[in-house]
């Protein structure tokens, strides 16, 4: 399965015309994925609200979110092996197509009044399995479409697309749910998937050059699936970064279901959607900064500092029910998130050989993202059996905390936020104290032969200066 263009020269140096051509391809794919992310955000918003309002259970909401993530994570190593064997463009097409079909099936269930939590879980799991191909293929393709000097900016643009989805989706989702119901959101999402597939059918991706590491990685599907684990394990700095990101994802995996329950404990779905949209402008602003900034001189320090700020803002969200304060804190947290993510992504793109990035990035997705299903599995029980009872009961600890955060179910969710934020700050401090992570950028050299610019200032001609 391949109609890729020839590999880049081993020198990696590209003239301005070739850089511009490849970057136009990146922009086309990026725009298609941006539109798709808006549609996916509509679906997430609509289904999250529907499940919680139908069941009133954080556990059921967490179960739905878990089904949409766990298959992708478990299948990531195998998917990564296929991504490095296939044309990465087709891997993305297959993933988008399967997700679109799943969305249509759920929309039909709503239109025929046959929707159930069980059906939602099954379809979500199947779509998640195909989605295992999407992320490693998209990220690995970026390495060949963007010069090394602009990895941070390209990663910022990817974050910008995610920000646009989070900005538009809650507000638009709240309006569409009120006008046409959840089925309307799902049908719009199906259209966005179709658009994303059309952009992928229009372009072609350059084929990555073969490296010594890539040749050594070739073997059976099982051997290639395990390669990413061995690769990361042997590079202590990258492994440390991966474990750190897994810890951050564990903390923020709790937030998805808890935020919905927390907000709905004192406001309406429409107001929640508007608040989310306002807060998401912070992510958009941070993404714009990341996409125009050439990157920090010490990216690991930037990641850790951003994580500290993020944790403090999460504490602020849980400590109040003021919509103004919540939006401001969420805005600040969302601002630093894309900057940190862009710095992390630029490290991975520069440190991993292009022809094994599918396998390595898939393992990266599995380990860093694998903590999120654990968080989703624990979020409901922790909220329903620990934090909410603590803030509604009469224990000595609960009484003390109630004097700070108030009494009631919503205060229990708020305490959950405070705990998550404090854990995140401590995690960043521990990351800085661990030497292999702190000195990752100097102890692991960049890969030679990556696409680079003959004239670094020529980036202005690409329109991303």
Image (spheres, helix red, strand yellow):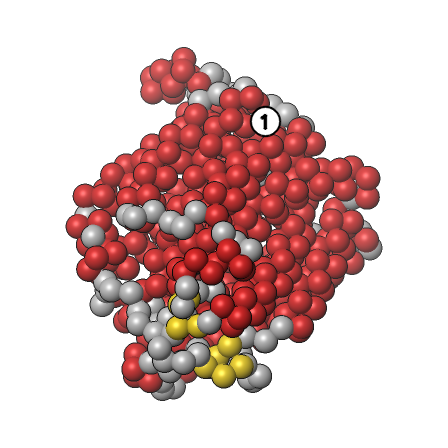
> Residue 58 falls in which quadrant of the image?
top right
Residue 245 visible (yes or no) = yes
Q: Which residue is labeled 1 in the image?
A: 265
Residue displayed at 48% across by 28% down: 329
Query: Front-most of 58 and 442?
Result: 442
| Quadrant position of the N terminus in the picture | bottom right
Residue displayed at 29% across by 82% down: 212
Query: Front-most of 457 and 367?
Result: 457
- From the top left corner, tell me how far across and down residue 432 is, in percent: 23, 43
- From the top left corner, tell me how far across and down residue 286 is, in percent: 49, 41
Residue displayed at 28% across by 59% down: 238
Task: Using the image, determine if residue 179 lies above or below residue 37.
Answer: above
6 relative position to 27: left or right: left
Task: Using the image, determine if residue 322 lies above or below residue 365.
Answer: above
53 relative position to 419: left or right: right
Query: Front-most of 310 and 109?
Result: 310
- From the top left corner, tell me how far across and down residue 71 is, in percent: 50, 63
- From the top left corner, tell me how far across and down residue 49 is, in percent: 65, 40
Residue 369 visible (yes or no) = no
361 relative position to 284: left or right: left
Work out which residue is located at the far top of the displayed protein and give it.
Answer: 403
How crowded pointer 1 is (Cα within 10 Å; few <14, some 14-19, many 20+) is rated as some
Callout 1 secondary element: loop
Residue displayed at 65% across by 35% down: 273
> Residue 303 falls in which quadrant of the image?
top left
């Amino acid at each position: 399965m391949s109609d890729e263009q020839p590999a880049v020269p081993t020198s990696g140096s590209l003239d301005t015309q070739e850089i511009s051509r490849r970057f136009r391809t990146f922009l086309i794919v990026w725009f298609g994925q941006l539109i798709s992310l808006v549609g996916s955000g509509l679906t997430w918003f609509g289904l999250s609200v529907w499940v919680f309002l139908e069941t009133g259970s954080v556990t059921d909401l967490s179960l739905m979110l878990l089904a949409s993530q766990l298959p992708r994570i478990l299948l990531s190593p195998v998917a990564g092996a296929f991504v490095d064997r296939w044309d990465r463009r087709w891997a993305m097409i297959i993933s988008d197509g399967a997700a679109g079909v799943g969305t249509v099936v759920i929309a039909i269930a709503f239109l025929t009044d046959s929707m159930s939590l069980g059906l939602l879980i099954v379809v979500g799991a199947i779509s998640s399995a195909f989605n295992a191909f999407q992320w490693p293929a998209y990220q690995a393709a970026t390495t060949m479409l963007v010069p090394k000097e602009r990895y941070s900016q390209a990663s910022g643009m990817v974050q910008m697309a995610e920000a646009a989805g989070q900005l538009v989706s809650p507000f638009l989702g709240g309006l569409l749910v009120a006008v046409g119901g959840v089925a309307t959101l799902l049908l719009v999402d199906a259209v966005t998937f179709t658009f994303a597939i059309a952009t992928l059918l229009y372009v072609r991706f350059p084929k990555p050059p073969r490296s010594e590491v890539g040749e050594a990685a070739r073997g059976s599907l099982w051997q290639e699936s395990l390669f990413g684990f061995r690769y990361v394990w042997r590079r202590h700095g990258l492994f440390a970064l991966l474990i750190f990101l897994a810890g951050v994802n564990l903390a923020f995996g709790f937030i998805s279901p808890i935020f919905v329950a927390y907000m709905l404990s004192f406001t309406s779905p429409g107001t929640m959607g508007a608040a989310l949209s306002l807060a998401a402008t912070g992510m958009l602003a941070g993404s714009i900064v990341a996409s125009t900034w050439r990157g920090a001189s010490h990216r690991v320090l930037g990641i850790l500092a951003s994580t500290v700020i993020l944790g403090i803002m999460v504490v602020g969200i849980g400590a109040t029910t003021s919509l103004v304060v919540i939006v401001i804190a969420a805005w600040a947290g969302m601002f630093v998130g894309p900057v940190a993510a862009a710095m992390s992504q630029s490290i991975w793109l520069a440190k991993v050989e292009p022809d094994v990035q599918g396998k390595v990035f898939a393992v990266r997705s599995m380990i860093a993202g694998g903590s999120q299903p654990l968080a989703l599995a624990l979020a409901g029980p922790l909220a329903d059996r620990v934090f909410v009872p603590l803030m509604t009961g009469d224990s000595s600890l609960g009484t003390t905390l109630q004097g700070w955060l108030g009494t009631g179910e919503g205060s229990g969710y708020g305490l959950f936020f405070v705990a998550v934020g404090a854990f995140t700050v401590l995690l960043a401090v521990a990351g800085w104290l661990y030497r292999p992570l702190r000195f990752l950028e100097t102890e692991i050299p960049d890969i030679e032969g990556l696409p680079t610019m003959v004239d670094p200032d020529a980036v202005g001609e690409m329109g991303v200066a």
